[in-house]
Image (cartoon, rainbow, N blue to C red):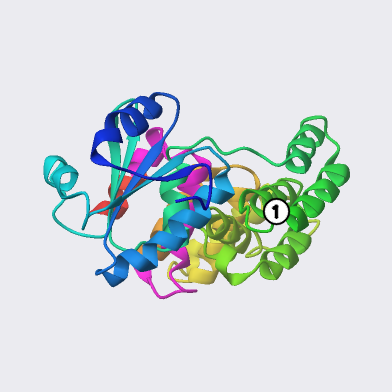
């Protein structure tokens, strides 16, 4: 196979050298395929595309199971499509079935260091020195250069939200292609934005407004819009625990409210907590029961 220098046909006699030895240097994917299995022919071009795109950050070995029967038997391969990822001589992940390109990218991201584009790298440095406008401009250029890198619009959204520029963040969020909006990192940020936008930007003291909302809840506990505004205002002052409390009560009362915003909002706030810590564990257990 000469499509790419990082892709090769794999024979039984070459397995140890090309897979096990090379896996000490970086990930090696081994794709077991057959021309007789249609799903294999769907999966193969996706793997080839990604391998070429990643430019040597992983190797791709192709095993024709109709020809390499001894190797297939030795490795215990019984179904197709089947892909193994090797690192340091060990299998670290298996892929069964004709996974989508998006799913494959997510799997690869767990095993392959992701290199930022030069423009994105420069933008991050500008963020670190407090130069927000310069960073946003560089990120906008980086998106044009590498439109499939979801990390760039995610960083733009994150920066705009951090700066309290919610209107601009919302415009950016809905200008992102639907395929990228569906990425977990983007959808979580869009949920953050949805919660932030649930309370108005006004001159009223945040603490005073929060106290008034608690008073309203004492008078009319079931009002979910009040709870959502309260969760929003609490989030804006970084009181994540009390914001989670309100989102949890919304989730308990009505899972259909604003497309299950109570539950989605909790997951988004979990990500702010790094999916760890006492507050995270407390509320994770609540939604698991």
Of residues 98 and 255, which is closer to you in this image? 98
Q: Circle 1: is it few (<14), some (14-19), or many (20+) Cα within 10 Å?
A: some
Q: Is residue 170 above or below residue 60?
A: below
Tell me what residue is drawn at x 31 percent, y 54 percent: 287
Q: Is residue 152 magenta?
A: no
In the drawing, does residue 206 fall left or right of residue 77? right
Tell me what residue is drawn at x 58 percent, y 63 percent: 180
Check disc 1 and report the residue beneath it.
Answer: 146
Q: Is residue 267 visible?
A: no
Q: Position of residue 114 (x, y in %)?
A: 57, 39
Range of magenta residues: 253-282
Q: Is residue 274 magenta?
A: yes
Of residues 218 and 65, which is closer to you in this image? 65
Q: Position of residue 213 (x, y in %)?
A: 58, 60
In the drawing, does residue 81 fall left or right of residue 234? left
Q: Position of residue 41 (x, y in %)?
A: 36, 67
Q: Is residue 254 above or below residue 97?
A: below
The secondary element bearing badge 1 is classed as: loop
Tell me what residue is drawn at x 76 percent, y 39 percent: 118
Q: Is residue 173 visible?
A: yes
Tell me what residue is drawn at x 55 percent, y 50 percent: 52
Q: Which image quarter holds the C terminus?
A: bottom left
In the drawing, does residue 72 fall left or right of residue 212? left
Q: Is residue 255 above or below residue 15?
A: below
Of residues 9 and 235, which is closer to you in this image? 9
Q: Position of residue 94 (x, y in %)?
A: 27, 46
In the drawing, does residue 80 fall left or right of residue 186? left
């Amino acid at each position: 196979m000469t499509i790419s220098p990082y892709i090769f046909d794999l024979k039984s006699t070459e397995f140890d050298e090309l897979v096990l030895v090379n896996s000490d240097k970086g990930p090696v994917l081994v794709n077991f395929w057959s021309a007789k299995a249609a799903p294999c022919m769907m999966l193969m071009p996706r793997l080839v595309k990604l391998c070429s795109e990643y430019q040597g950050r992983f190797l791709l070995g192709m095993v024709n199971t109709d020809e390499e029967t001894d190797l297939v038997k030795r490795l215990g391969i019984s179904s197709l499509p089947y892909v193994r990822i090797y690192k340091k001589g060990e299998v670290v992940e298996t892929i069964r079935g004709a996974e989508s390109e998006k799913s494959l990218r997510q799997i690869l991201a767990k095993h392959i260091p992701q290199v930022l584009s030069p423009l994105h790298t420069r933008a991050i440095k500008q963020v670190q020195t407090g130069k927000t406008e310069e960073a946003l401009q560089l990120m906008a250029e980086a998106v044009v250069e590498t439109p499939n890198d979801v990390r760039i619009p995610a960083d733009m959204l994150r920066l705009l939200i951090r700066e309290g520029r919610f209107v601009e963040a919302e415009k950016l969020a809905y200008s992102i292609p639907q395929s990228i909006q569906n990425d977990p990192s983007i959808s979580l940020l869009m949920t953050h934005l949805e919660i932030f936008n649930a309370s108005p930007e006004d001159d009223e003291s945040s603490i005073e407004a929060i106290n008034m909302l608690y008073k309203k809840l004492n008078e009319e506990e079931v009002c979910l819009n009040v709870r959502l505004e309260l969760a929003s205002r609490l989030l804006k002052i970084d009181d994540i625990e009390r914001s989670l409390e309100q989102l949890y009560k919304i989730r308990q009362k009505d899972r259909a409210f604003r497309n299950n915003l109570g539950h989605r909002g909790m997951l988004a706030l979990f990500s702010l907590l790094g999916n760890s810590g006492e507050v995270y564990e407390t509320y994770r257990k609540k939604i698991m029961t």
